[in-house]
Image (cartoon, rainbow, N blue to C red):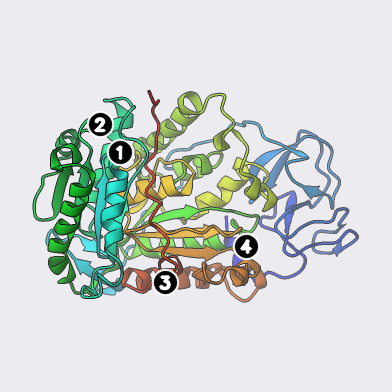
Amino acid sequence: MSDTLNKVIAGPVIRLHPEDNVVIARTDVAIGTAVPSDNFVCRSQVTAGYKIAARAIVKGEAVRKYNVTIGFANTDIAAGTMVHNHNVEFREFDRDHAFCADYRAVDMLADEQRATFQGIVRENGEIATRNYIGILSTVNCSATVAHKIAQWFTPERLADYPNVDGVVAFTHGIGCGMEMSGEPMALLRRTMAGYARHPNLAAALVIGLGCERNQLAGLMEQEGLSAGSRLHTFIMQESGGTRRTIEAGIEAVRALLPAANRVTRTAVSASHLKIGLQCGGSDGFSSITANPALGAAVDLLVRHGGTAILSETPEIYGVEHTLTRRAVSREVGEKLLERIRWWKEEYSVGRDVQINGKVSPGNQIGGLANIFEKSIGSSMKGGTGPLMEVYRYAEPVKQRGLVFMDTPGFDPVSATGQIAGGANLIAFTTGRGSMFGAKPVPSLKLATNTRMFERLIEDMDLNCGGILDGVASVESTGRAIFDAMLAAASGQRTKSELLGLGDHEFVPWQIGIMS
């Protein structure tokens, strides 16, 4: 869908596909502005990133962007009129899922041709991009203890351990008052276990209270975890209470630091990269610049043997047929549709949520009319290659290439699932300017437009707005993103890391009832 963007963009509007009946305002467009490329005069004051009718659109006609239906005109729309949620209706329409019709195997690079980065090789052969010690709580009741242990290890106290990136608490607000069995508890436990096993943790402590429903013993048994040199467990009610558990946890971490510090980085293949793909604070330029550029980087990554995890199920809804068509098998395509059916028919029935049409106020202000339009851009982050597998939330990602993980669209929850699944880096596009970090992995922030990038320079890692400005292509920006991935994986600090973000973004998906 992004082929037209390989050309230099100029003029007041951007045409994304010859069959589209809307164009995108490249800059703010005044009433009366002539648009010779599409033979109309603008009848509205249109903000950059918003849509303009390129011809007359009759009531009930599909509004098409990238030649994909994003809604239906709820009134006659004259050429040159701004097109947004005031005159576009969200409603369902038939989509041809055409399983595997567009599947093409990836032209993989030979091992000796693949890029490398400076990674940390763990004893089990897994590759880390960072080197933390983690403190996990089984329940909200032990969260304070976990935070107190982590907070004791200030930069000054860690000064003698320069190879340790920090001691970080991963706490949450559940673990009790919830179902004792079934998917809600299983999801929480596999999320915690995914972090406890994550190669970016040199070691981990797990802190329980003792009477919670998410019993420490049950977590360990379900997830096949064993206490040892790398994993220590504490139960507050058996350890003497709050103060004594904090003291014991601090001593345990102090004992772990010398071994954690004995790491070196060495050249490893880019095939060890697992990138969680995120977008937040999207705008009308997301599908024109940062998302297709990240997709180009993903295509490069996959050719080098790496893995990209596309997620946010509500944000591929409406264009899921573009993924099922690229699925490696009908089974994989059906897995994706099953997850969407669960969202539509069980999880969100009758709820005023994104998958049922409305996007956030920030997305609307950014020029996106509804979820169908947002999904066009969101899905582009996955590139153009085949869909190799579909995972439930926080399941371990084993398949290389482009995969999908079922998550909500809320960024901290979605990224938590990806990291639990093994992502060792997050690539995050934003048009409005989301501020995000996600310890224990680095997060790269990719701006869709130059204006926002310059305004939020301390938070943004890379500007994709050069595509919009006509000074860069999707391919060249994708290459720059790929290079930034390698640099971040090698230890170069991202903007969110320099700002200290990521201490509060461990947010497991809460899908069950509370009692």
**In the picture provided, is 119 more to the left or to the right than 23?**
left
Report the number of numbered marks: 4
Secondary element type, mark 3: helix
Q: Disc 2 marks which residue? A: 212
- Amino acid found under the numbered disc labelled 3: Ala
| Residue 422 in view here | no
Secondary element type, mark 1: helix
- Amino acid found under the numbered disc labelled 2: Glu
Q: Residue at left 28%, top 57%?
A: 150
Disc 3/disc 1 C-alpha distance (Å): 39 Å
Q: Earlier in the sequence, mark 4 or mark 1?
A: 4
The circle drawn on residue 267 is none
Q: Disc 4 marks which residue? A: 4
Q: Are the two marked residues, 3 and 1, in contact with CB atoms closer than 8 angstroms?
A: no
> Label 3 neighbourhood size at 10 Å, few (<14), some (14-19), many (20+)?
some
The circle drawn on residue 484 is 3
Q: Residue at left 37%, top 39%?
A: 173
- Amino acid found under the numbered disc labelled 1: Cys
The residue most toward the left is 228
Q: Are the two marked residues, 1 and 2, in contact with CB atoms closer than 8 angstroms?
A: yes
Q: Disc 1 marks which residue? A: 141
Q: Earlier in the sequence, mark 1 or mark 2?
A: 1
Q: Is residue 507 above or below residue 198?
A: above
Residue 455, x across and y down, in percent: 62, 69
Name the image quarter holding residue 406.
top left
Q: Nearer the viewer, residue 270 or 129?
A: 129
Q: Are the two marked residues, 3 and 2, in contact with CB atoms closer than 8 angstroms?
A: no
